[in-house]
């Protein structure tokens, strides 16, 4: 889910903003209404957010200037576009293997039938398969 080299550049800029602000991941997350782990994932480049909003809130908490926010937006835009290309070039998901058409419940029903006591007439009430 990363955006390639643009995702790494985005992460580097976020780390620089965090370092300059002196805030921890937890403090940035609390002020930006994000979890600490989410902020860490963005700063380490593991994920790129779907919308620019979380990054803008992080930049606001870290007191980024207008030019830094513009650069952050351009990097996010490129990383988001690269993520779309990565998803389009991913191999298709294989179809699930062939399954029993009737599912699991007929086997359970046969098991219950085999556990029943024989009928008083001596013949089974249910024909076995």
Image (tube, rainbow, N blue to C red):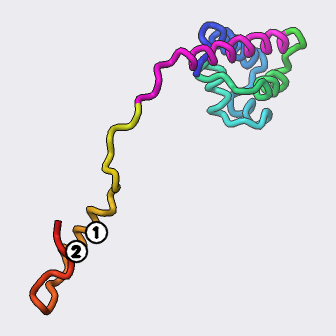
Horizontal and vertical percent position of residue 89 = 53, 15
Quadrant position of the C terminus in the picture: bottom left
What residue occupies the far bottom of the structure in this picture?
120
Q: Residues within 10 Å of mark 1 (few under 14, many from 20)?
A: few
> Marks 2 and 1: CB-CB under 8 Å?
yes
Residue at 21 percent across and 77 percent down: it is 126
What span is in magenta?
A: 68-94
Residue position marked by numbered label 1 in the rendering: 109
Q: Could you tell me which residue is drawn at 41 percent across and 29 percent down?
A: 94
Q: Which residue is mark 2?
A: 113
The correct choice, above or below, for 121 with respect to 96 in the image is below
- Relative vertical location of residue 38 with respect to residue 68 in this rendering, above or below: below
Question: Of helix, strand and loop, which mostly describes the magenta segment?
Answer: helix
| Residue drawn 77% across the image and 37% down it | 33
Q: Secondary structure at mark 2?
A: helix
104 w.r.t. 18: above or below? below
Vertically, is 63 above or below 113? above
In front here: 22 or 75?
75
């Amino acid at each position: 889910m990363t955006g390639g080299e643009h995702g790494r550049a985005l992460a580097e800029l976020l780390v620089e903003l965090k370092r300059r602000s002196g805030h921890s991941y937890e403090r940035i997350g609390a002020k930006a209404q994000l979890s600490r782990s989410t902020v860490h994932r963005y700063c380490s480049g593991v994920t790129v957010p779907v919308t620019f909003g979380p990054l803008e809130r992080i930049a606001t908490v870290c007191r980024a200037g207008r030019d830094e926010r513009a650069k952050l937006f351009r990097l996010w835009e490129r990383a988001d576009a690269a993520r779309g290309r990565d998803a389009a070039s991913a191999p298709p998901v294989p179809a699930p293997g062939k399954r029993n058409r009737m599912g699991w419940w007929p086997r359970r029903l046969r098991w219950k039938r085999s556990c029943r006591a024989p009928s008083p007439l001596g013949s089974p009430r249910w024909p076995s398969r």
